[in-house]
Image: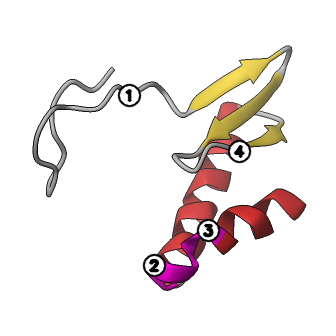
Amino acid sequence: MDTFNRAGENGATPFRTDRFFSVSDKWYFSTREGFDSGPYASKLRAEEGLKRFLKVAQLVPHEDSHKVTRIHRIY
């Protein structure tokens, strides 16, 4: 678990956990927005899915960022 502030963070360090978890033999990732994405066949696939999610999230203007979560849940 990360116990240090990241670049640009001030104040108390928030609680952090690993974004990846498995249920049976399927892998998922969690987002800060509070949803889980998956299942993926492997942890590597889940990591690739998270990278794709983050690329899309960076393209969306901040005021519309909540829409990324809603769109990603559909797929």
Q: Is residue 43 magenta?
A: no
Q: Which residue is mark 2?
A: 62
Q: Position of residue 73 (x, y in %)?
A: 81, 57
Q: Quadrant of the C terminus?
A: bottom right
Q: Mark 4 or mark 3: name the one nearer the start of the chain.
A: 4
What distance separates the C-alpha of mark 2 from that of mark 3?
8 Å
Report the magenta stretch's main SS: helix
Q: Secondary structure at mark 4?
A: helix
Q: Which mark is residue 16?
A: 1
| Badge 2 amino acid | His
Q: Which mark is residue 41?
A: none
Q: Which mark is residue 66?
A: 3
| Badge 3 amino acid | His
Residue that appears at 11% across and 40% down: 11
Task: State if disc 1 and disc 2 touch (CB < 8 Å).
Answer: no
Left or right, residue 75 beside residue 4 = right
Residue that appears at 62% across and 39% down: 30
Q: Is residue 75 visible?
A: no
Left or right, residue 2 beside residue 54 = left
Q: Residues within 10 Å of mark 1 (few under 14, many from 20)?
A: few
Residue that appears at 34% across and 25% down: 15
Residues in magenta, as a range: 61-66
- Please tell me in which quadrant of the rendered image residue 17 appears: top left
| Badge 1 amino acid | Arg
Closer to the eye: label 2 or 1? 2
